[in-house]
Image (cartoon, rainbow, N blue to C red):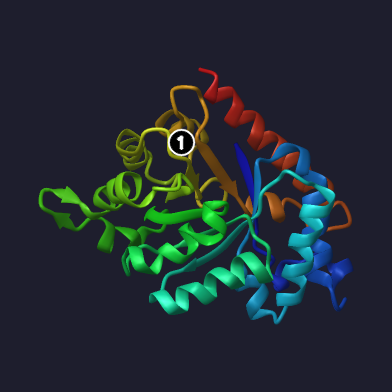
Amino acid sequence: MLCVGLDPDVARLPSQLSGRPRAIFEFCAAIVDATAELVCAFKPQIAYFAAARADDQLEALIDHIHTNHPGIPVILDGKRGDIGSTAELYAREAFERYHADAVTLSPYMGKDSIAPFIDYAEGTKGVILLCRTSNAGGSDLQFLDVGGRKLYEVVAEMVAMQWNSRGNCALVVGATYPEELARVRSIVGEMPLLVPGIGAQGGDIEATVRAGKTSSGTGLIINSSRAILYAANGPNFAAAARTAASETRDAINRFRAN
C-alpha cells in the first residue's frame, strides 16, 4: 500500500545532477526505477515541476513509468477545482497531456467542478478528493460544524454516497489525524483512501494502518515523499531511497496483518 510521492526540490537534488538540463527527470526516474517493485502507485506533485519550468520532464517521467513499469498507476497531485468549463480543460491536461491515471482535486466548488474528471473516458480515471488533509490549517474549514457534523465528514459522505456513481472516487485523509481517518473509513466503507503525512510530516504508520485499513487489510494508498526521495544526497541516492521505501513498506505490511 506504499505510494512514493515525487516532489523534486531543485535545491535538494544530488550534486552530481546539478546543472544538468534534465536533472529533475533523471532524479525522479532513478527513484522510480529503484522503488517500482515496492509500491502501489507513484504521485508526482505538479507544482515542483511547473515552478522549475519542467513540465516537459513531468510528461517524460509519467511516460517512463508507464513504459518501464506498466501496471503501476500514476496519481497526478494537482489539487484542481474550478468551474465546469475550466475543469474540463484541467481534466484534459491531467489525462491527455500528462496521461495520469488519477488526479487529486478540491471538492469545495461542488460536484459540477468535479464531474468532468469523474466522467472522463466513461469513468476510467481515478478522482481523489481532499477530505481531511494532513496540514495543521486544514481544521480551519474541515472542522466547521455542519448540522452537528464536521465538514470533512459531510464531504466524505457526499463523495461516497452521491458523487461516486462510476466507482472511481477516493478521498485524501492525512496520516497525522488517525482518529479522523478511522471516522472517514466508517463513513465510506471500502472506498480507497490516499493518506499523505507519513515520514517527514510525522504520521505514525501503525496508527494509520490500524485506523484506515478495510476489513480485508487493504484500501489505503499511503504516501511518503521526502523521507524516501532524500534518504541520501550522494551517488547512492537511489539505493538509499529503495532502502527507505522497503522499510516503510515492511512496516505497513506488518501492521496490516495484525
Query: Tag 1's secondary structure?
Result: helix
Q: Can residue 144 be seen in the rendering of this structure?
A: yes
Residue 101 versus residue 185 in the image, above or below: below
- Say whether residue 164 is left or right of residue 89: left
Q: Label 1, on which residue?
A: 208
What is the residue that sits farthest to the bottom in this orientation? 53
Q: Nearer the viewer, residue 117 or 252?
A: 117
In this view, the residue farthest toward the front is 122
Q: Residue at x 41, y 58 (%)?
A: 135
Query: Which of the 4 quarters of the picture holds residue 125?
Result: bottom right
Q: Is residue 214 above or below residue 154?
A: above
Q: Position of residue 195 (x, y in %)?
A: 49, 46
Residue 7 is situated, as x and y percent measured from the top left of the image, at: 65, 63
Q: Up-down: is 26 above or below 239?
A: below
Q: Image height check: is 45 above or below 238?
A: below
Residue type for callout 1: Thr
Farthest residue, direction top: 258
Is residue 31 in view from this perspective?
Answer: no
* Residue ID at (46%, 66%): 116
Res. 184 image quadrant:
top left
Q: Residue placed at 86% from the left, 51% from the top?
A: 236
